[in-house]
Image: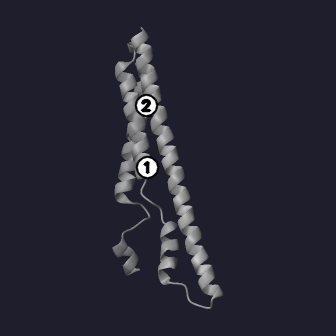
Amino acid sequence: MLRDGMENWMVALFILGAVAISMLAAGWSQWLEHRRRAQAMEIIKVAIEAGKEPPQILYEQLARTNQSKPPWTEVVVFSALGFGFWIAYATGAPDRQVPFLVIASTMTVTALGCLALAIMRPGGGSKDDDDAG
């Protein structure tokens, strides 16, 4: 009985850890992206105030930040959550397995959907497409 309780806590800690790490990573990524945009805008401002044309690469960098990015982070998060709930399903008491099965299946299907989106890069296009247009 105590062993089952310990396994449930391990699964809960695994899921909590995966979510916390992904949230921190997403926040860090957004902060870095904000800093990059702010620095590019500052360089453009200084160049215009000096009466010079800002480098074209800065405009290209700002344009790239507005493009949608493949959801690789979501693939990792939903895969980790699905994995945790599959463990909970496999180790849970038979009368408590159905909710774990439903959530594990949902998380797995969501992870597979995000993986398909990440591979196909909807709305992102490739560099060849950008150069042609």
Q: Is residue 79 above or below residue 8?
A: below
Kindly identify the amino acid type of the residue bearing the numbered disc 2.
Answer: Phe
Q: Mark 1 or mark 2, which is nearer the start of the sequence? A: 2
Disc 2 is placed on an element classified as helix
The disc at residue 39 is none
Is residue 123 visible to the viewer in this orientation of the structure?
A: yes
For image coordinates 34% across by 22% down, the residue present is 90
Could you tell me residue 29's position as x and y percent? 50, 55
Is residue 96 visible to the viewer in this orientation of the structure?
A: no
Could you tell me residue 7's position as x and y percent? 40, 19
For image coordinates 47% across by 27% down, the residue present is 12
Closer to us: 61 or 107: 61
For image coordinates 43% across by 28% down, the residue present is 102
Could you tell me residue 64's position as x and y percent? 47, 70
Kindly identify the amino acid type of the residue bearing the numbered disc 1.
Answer: Thr
Q: Nearer the viewer, mark 2 or mark 1?
A: 2
Could you tell me residue 54's position as x and y percent? 55, 85
Residue beneath label 1, please?
73
